[in-house]
Image (spheres, rainbow, N blue to C red):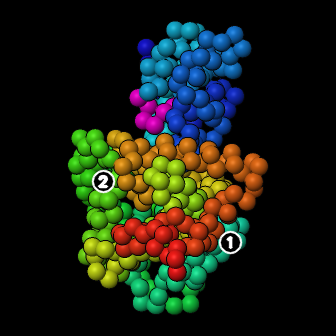
Amino acid sequence: MRTEITPEEMGSLLPDEYMLVDTRDESDYEHGFIPGCLLFSPDKVRELAKARLCPFPKDKKLILYCKYGTVTRDLAEELREDGFDAWSLAGGYGAWALHAIKEEENSEEKRADIEHSIQKKFHASLINPFARAIIRYQLIQPGDKICVCISGGKDSMLMAKLFQELQMHGQFRFELVFLCMDPGYNEANRHIIESNARLLGIPLTFFETEIFNAVDNITSSPCYICARMRRGYLYKKAKELGCNKIALGHHFDDVIETAFMGMMYSGQWEAMLPKLHSTNFEDMQLIRPMYFIHESDIKKWRDYNNLHFIQCACHFTDTCTTCAVLPGEYHTGHKRAETKRIIAELKKNNPDIETNIFHATENVSIDKVLGWKKDGVRHSFLERFEE
């Protein structure tokens, strides 16, 4: 018996004819979801289905979705045995997102609305902090040719739009290349990235690598190795294209979470700097112009414009192309999600916790630290104790 329903078929149903359940991880949900869904893990769905006070009605369709439609096929069959009219969304969230994007990707009106929202509604929360980081940290100079690195997620796509705004209305001239590296994405992910780029008016330059396959059999720190390889490929390709800088889409939350993660999981306290000199590619710099933009404001822009992005998943983690990975770390996605939860919990009693963590990275008192590293050499407070 058929248990799958296509995005097109679901779109033809009335809202009161079905209940929609997202069975993915919370981190996947945060990157994009189908409006009107409930979020439950597969095990929680099974538990609720067997409970007396079950939230799932038996008089309407119960549509389940995961990333690619593989997990929920079996789950739908199980629920049917318990009397539910359960269906699995064919192709999962990826197929639905691609269907939703393709319906509007050639709409000039939709693109104009998106750009207008950046210029007007989200000017204070997106354009202003973007410009402030560029000015404060001197991220761009006249004549720069910047490689804007696109992973396909909400952060890098918004960064591309903000760069376009700056180039159009800025005070000096610079060039942009919008570069997307395909390290081995599945076909659905690649199509979604391409469709979103067309919708947003971002002229992507694609190049392919086999990085995901190369790290597939690595058991020790595959995420760290993968991230280093991806960064190296981006630098190399950007230099070939004549760029002198690469721009990554790390935002304010990435900055404070990385500092916090370093302390908790690696026993070190260091900042994610807004710009870096490349150690392997002469005259190349890395810049992070979204340094002051909060992730919550990126999500507001995404949801206001009904945009659908994905996490560009590999075999190990949902970390995007531009994510920072700590040495020795196996599953960055879980640790980052845990760090987000810790900071959110601390924020309940201290609303300034995020700002304080950020300022802590720039207010280090050298006179009151036990030790530090300079150019790879460890130093102790004892060296200066008698001075």
The residue that mark 2 highlights is 225
Q: Is residue 67 magenta?
A: yes
Q: Specify whether 108 is left or right of 282.
A: right
Mark in front: 1 vs 2: 2
Residue at x-position 48% and y-position 83%: 140
Q: Amino acid at mark 2?
A: Ile
Rounded to the nearest angstrom, the CA distance separating label 1 from label 2 is: 37 Å
Specify the segment rendered in magenta: 65-70
Residue at 41% across, 73% down: 374
Q: Is residue 191 left or right of residue 52?
A: left
| Residue 151 rendering spot, x and y as whole percentages | 42, 58
Q: Which secondary structure, mark 2? A: helix
- Which residue is disc 1 drawn over? 123
Earlier-in-chain disc, 1 versus 2: 1
- In this view of the protein, which residue sits in the foreground, 60 or 79? 79
Mark yes or no: residue 25 visible: yes
* Depth order, front residue of 92/8: 92
